[in-house]
Amino acid sequence: MATGPRQVGLPAWLFLPAALGALFVLLPLAAMLTRIRWSHFLALVGSESSVAALLLSLRTSTASTVLCVVLGVPMAMVLARTSFRGQQLLRSLVLLPLVLPPVVGGIALLYTFGRRGLLGHSLDVLGIQVAFSTTAVVMAQTFVALPFLVVSLEGALRSAGQRYEAVAATLGARPTTVFRRVTLPLVLPGLASGAVLSFARSLGEFGATITFAGSLQGVTRTLPLEIYLQRETDPDAAVALSLVLVVVAVVVLGLARGGRGIR
Amino acid sequence: MTLELSATVLERGLDLSLRVEEHEVLALLGPNGSGKSTVLSVIAGLLRPDRGRARLADRVLFDIAASGGPHAWVPPHDRGVALLAQEPLLFPHLSALDNVAFGPRSAGHSRTRARALAARWLEEVDATPLATRRPAQLSGGQAQRIAVARALAADPRLLLLDEPMAALDVAVAPALRQMLRRVLHGRTAVIVTHDVLDALLLSDRVLVVEDGHVVEHGPTAQVLARPRSPFAARIAGLNMVRGTLDGHGVRSAEGLHVDGLADQPLTPGGPGVAVFRPSAVGVYRHPPGGSPRNVFESTVTELEPFGDQFRVRTADLSADVTAAAVADLDLTLGTRVVLTVKASEVAIYPA
């Protein structure tokens, strides 16, 4: 992604709002750092409930990212490589969670998979109870994160075009072979950044989770929920855990950038 | 592997039929946008025509009736038709060797066997030392050679080439052309081009396509020596006046009358063409006296170097003159000139 020498200069006044924007993002992070009581940091972060929340967050976010890839790759392929009536509408609806308040998503999930929801009774008969379980956390995270993967991969698929796929087909490759040996490798960077975005979104998920999965320690109380609860009783712990979340997010973004360089 | 095709693609205004005999290379000639590449897409199965049918040897590739009739469609990967495009389109994530091995792998060969086959084809196109390179590390000419090897390694029953030299440097095109001449020998192939050299060196027969229709076809040498369509005349570098036969000449709709020699009896009133070389055309500022010739008054519209001479173009005709003549006659764009050509230099035949 090397950028060439700049051809046209930027208008000088552009730098002021740009700097303000950067400051607006960075200043609150710095402010948070100033409030951390470093002497108690390890004790705060290492408490039983904190560790449980962090591990639960990492576990559920990984699971939901895998789900996003498994469901999102086929969705992006269908959206990018086929055309049918109502496709535009379907795309808008599928991407709705991007703009929907997560708490609304949580309510929607509750009325689908909850005990009195659309499918809840059928699931109940089968002995499956989804709401207020770790499964529900993963579902809530997948619900909000899926569009990130679909959008990012569909863009990669469209810009990769279909010419390589056409060549592969004329060389005798069946559709599955074309998908596996040509399409996927070509859009791998797009898929990786989509997966990272999904993971990051899952990690930060709050509204849908608390609505659909509740807040049971070790079962559904993920790190964002833990932070929100601690804020009431122990603000120092909340700030310390926030820093942990920031560090995890930075590491994830760093991995994504590094991964993009390999290709 | 004889190919028979008839296809209509309404959106692109294409409506034509063609036939390629076994072991024959057919060149599709025509101006840009005439539908040549569309024909290849239809044969390869990348574009579904509105109606038509195609058969390769004893196998129906597609059969699409206007409505309610028979319907057959073989997907691209099952046709045994490989397509070599203007750009090499090597898979960027695979080495040159694995690009060439792609076809054999898709055909179900083991990785080892596919690579062995690929190595043979790389050798065939003199690219063995490039085997481990990634496409990004190859020049345009090298990449196109490997693309040829990749297409041939898929063991196609029919090879389609879409202006394979068009994106290459003029410096490397001749080498690739020679290589194609070698590997196309004895194959059934269709090549789209608007280069007269490609047609002459690579094809047995040509088909001239204009606006989606066949306007002329025949053996390559014959079409280029005695063109009947303006496009064929232009790429053969010949002047052509089309019109109605009368006596020993042709009268065009624009009122031009050209006398010449016919090697067969002509039917007055029928369509005909007068064809002559630009080097046979004389350029003057004023009508010359002397022996009876064809004389045309015209205006210079273009003047370009052509070998060690200059090619003077007017609305209808071209003439080749020396640089000295350009200076003597003080030729520039817009100069009124008189063009002459002896009747003995003009071939007249029915169109």
Image (spheres, coloured by chain):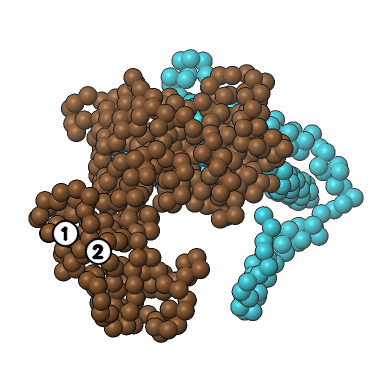
Query: In 3D space, how far apart are the residues under numbered discs 1 and 2 (Cα atoms)?
Result: 9 Å
Q: Is residue B231 above or below residue A202?
A: below
User: Left of B131 or right of it: where is A106?
Assistant: left
Query: Which residue, as the protein is rendered here, is positioned at the far left?
Result: B269
How crowded is the residue under tag 1: few (<14 C-alpha within 10 Å), some, or many (20+)? some
The front one of B349 and A219 is B349
Give the letter of the cyan chain: A
Which chain is home to disc 1?
B
Q: Earlier in the sequence, mark 1 or mark 2?
A: 1
What residue is shown with label 2? B343
Which three-letter amino acid code belongs to the residue tagged 1?
Answer: His
The front one of A204 and B73 is B73
Give the letter of the brown chain: B
Residue visible at 52% across and 52% down? B167
Asked whether the viewer can see residue B302, the reply is yes
Q: Is residue B11 above or below residue B184?
A: below
Query: In x, y percent, where is residue B343?
Result: 25, 64
The front one of A58 and B299 is B299
Which three-letter amino acid code belongs to the residue tagged 2?
Answer: Ala
User: Left of A95 or right of it: where is A43?
Assistant: right
- Quadrant position of the N terminus of chain B in the picture: top left
Q: Is residue B347 above or below residue A118?
A: below
Query: Which residue, as the protein is rendered here, is positioned at the far front?
Result: B291
What residue is shown with label 1? B248
Residue visible at 65% across and 37% down? B126
The image quadrant of residue A17 is bottom right
User: Left of A188 or right of it: where is B266?
Assistant: left
Disc 1 and disc 2 in contact, CB within 8 angstroms: yes
